[in-house]
Amino acid sequence: MKKMNNIWAPWRIKYIETMVNEDLQEKGCIFCGKQDKEDHQDFVLKRGQHSFVILNIYPYNNGHLLFAPYDHIADISDFNKEQILEIFSFINLFKKRMSDRMNCDGFNVGVNIGKTAGAGVEDHVHFHLVPRWNGDTNFMPVITDTKVIPQALEQVWELLEKE
């Protein structure tokens, strides 16, 4: 039987504790709150008719993007065809853009539905696109409890925003 490998991400506990301890209902939905905001200030990369693309301000890796519908929907089962098509078109567009501009070696694409599945914002479903590079995991998180993100959010936004 093959042994299962573990991927440790101890630097994420600060984000998880913040999400658990804060009452997000009082603050409102972070995605609904971005719908009418300025794009550059709020790291919104692209807006469509049904959804938008935003940089994750708590990234797992440099360039971590989120794709969310404008509608406050908790489960992908409630998406309509237009929302599905637009979000996956955006994922495809930004995967290609990151490959071309950031020289990624691979990608993680995912969605967490419900708190038990790891959704930090469980009432507004969203997809993740995380670029990966060979060797992007190193000793820093284990030894120093620190994850190195080598590029500022502003720089990533400028790199990926232009058509």
Image: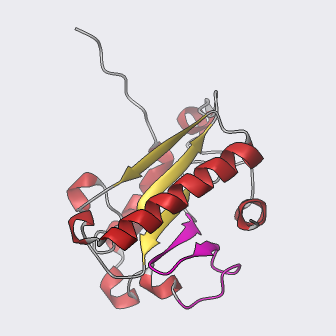
Q: Residue furthest top?
A: 1
- For the point 47% across and 87% down, the residue is 33
Q: State whether residue 139 is above or below residue 96.
A: above
- For the point 23% across and 62% down, the residue is 114
Quadrant (top left, top right, bottom left, bottom right) of the C terminus: bottom right
- For the point 32% across and 61% down, the residue is 119
Quadrant (top left, top right, bottom left, bottom right) of the N terminus: top left
Q: Please provide percent x and percent y for residue 142.
A: 53, 33
Instruction: Left or right? Give the position of 152 relative to 67.
Output: right
Q: State whether residue 19 is above or below residue 100.
A: below
Front position in the image: 17 or 129? 129
Q: State whether residue 82 is above or below residue 10.
A: below
Q: Quadrant of residue 104?
A: top right
Q: Which residues are magenta?
A: 36-56
Q: How is the image coloured?
A: secondary structure
Q: Please provide percent x and percent y for residue 105.
A: 63, 33
Q: Is residue 37 magenta?
A: yes
Q: Please provide percent x and percent y for residue 4.
A: 31, 20
- For the point 37% across and 65% down, the residue is 84
**Residue 116 makes an appearance in the image:** yes
Q: Please provide percent x and percent y for residue 43.
A: 64, 73
Front position in the image: 66 or 48? 48
Q: Is residue 49 magenta?
A: yes
Instruction: Left or right? Give the position of 142 relative to 113.
Output: right
Q: Quadrant of residue 120?
A: bottom left
